[in-house]
Amino acid sequence: MARPLDPAEAATAAMVHGAQVARVDTAGVTVSGVDGLVSDRPGLPLLASFADCYPVIVYDRNRPAVGLAHAGWRGTAAGIAGELVRTLEREYGSRPADLVAGIGPGICGDCYQVGQEVAERFDGFARPDEERRFRLDLVAANRAQLEASGVPAAGIHVHGACTFESAHLPSHRRRPDGARFYCLVALR
C-alpha cells in the first residue's frame, strides 16, 4: 500500500507567471522563479495553488516522470505547457507520444474577459465580446501547446469545471478574497 502524500513534504514553485520549469529531487523545497516542476521521484509531491489559472499535469506512461505547471494568461502566452513537455524530454528522456496530460479546472473561455493587450498575444484563442473586450480560452491555448509539442490529442484530458461559474471552486475574478485550490501530484 502506498503511503499517504503529505503536503508539508511537497515541492512547490514560487510562481512568477512565466514559463520556467525546474526539476526537483528533494521534498519540501520551494523553487524560486518558476511556474512548473518536474520529478521522477516516487512519493515526492509537486504542489501548486490556483484560483482562475489552470493546472497542467503531464505524466509519462513509460518512464517514471510527472510535471505540474501553473498556467495563467502570462504563462500560457510564454508557452508553459510546451516547456513542461520539453523539460520532461530533456531531464528524463520522455517521448511526447508517451505522455498524457490533464488541464484544469480554471476560468473558462466564456467567462474569462480580457483587454485587447492580452487578446493580441493569443491569436485564435480570444474572441471579441459584446462589451468591446475579449473572451480568452486558456484551455484551447494550452491544449494547442501540448499537441504542438507532440502529446497525442487523445491523451489530453480537460476538467470541465469553470472556477468563475462554480460555487465550489475559488475564483479571483468572482471573489478576490485570496482563496485558492491546490493541485498535488506525485508518482507512486
Image: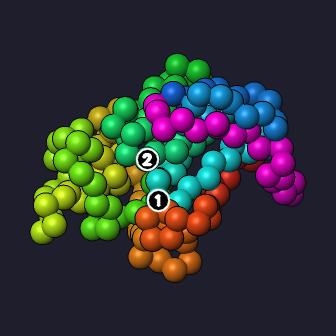
Relative to 173, say whether 122 is above or below. above
Instruction: Indicate the quadrant where residue 108 lies.
Output: bottom left
Label 1, secondary structure: give it: loop
- At label 1, the amino acid type is Asp
- At label 2, the amino acid type is Gly
Residue neighbourhood size for the residue with mark 1, other residues' Cα within 10 Å, grouped as few (<14), some (14–19), many (≥20): many
> Measuring 37% from the left and 32% from the top, which residue is drawn there?
78
Query: What's the magenta region?
Result: 1-19
Of the 4 image quadrants, the one containing the N terminus is bottom right
Residue 68 at x, y percent in the picture: 57, 43
Query: Who comes first in sequence, dot 2 or dot 1?
Result: 1
Residue neighbourhood size for the residue with mark 2, other residues' Cα within 10 Å, grouped as few (<14), some (14–19), many (≥20): many
Q: Label 1 belongs to which residue?
A: 52
Residue 183 at x, y percent in the picture: 63, 55
Q: Is residue 94 visible?
A: no
User: Residue 72 — which label?
Assistant: 2
Towards the viewer: 128 or 20: 128
Label 2, secondary structure: give it: loop
Instruction: Indicate the quadrant where residue 64 lies.
Output: top right
User: Residue 156 — which label?
Assistant: none
Q: Main secondary structure of the magenta part?
A: loop
For this orientation, the residue located farthest to the top is: 90
Residue 137 at x, y percent in the picture: 29, 56
Residue 92 at x, y percent in the picture: 59, 24
Residue 97 in magenta stretch: no
98 left or right of 31? left
| Colouring used for the render | rainbow
129 left or right of 103? left
Measured Cα–Cα span from mark 2 to mark 1: 8 Å
Towards the viewer: 12 or 180: 180
- 2 and 1 marks in contact (CB < 8 Å): yes
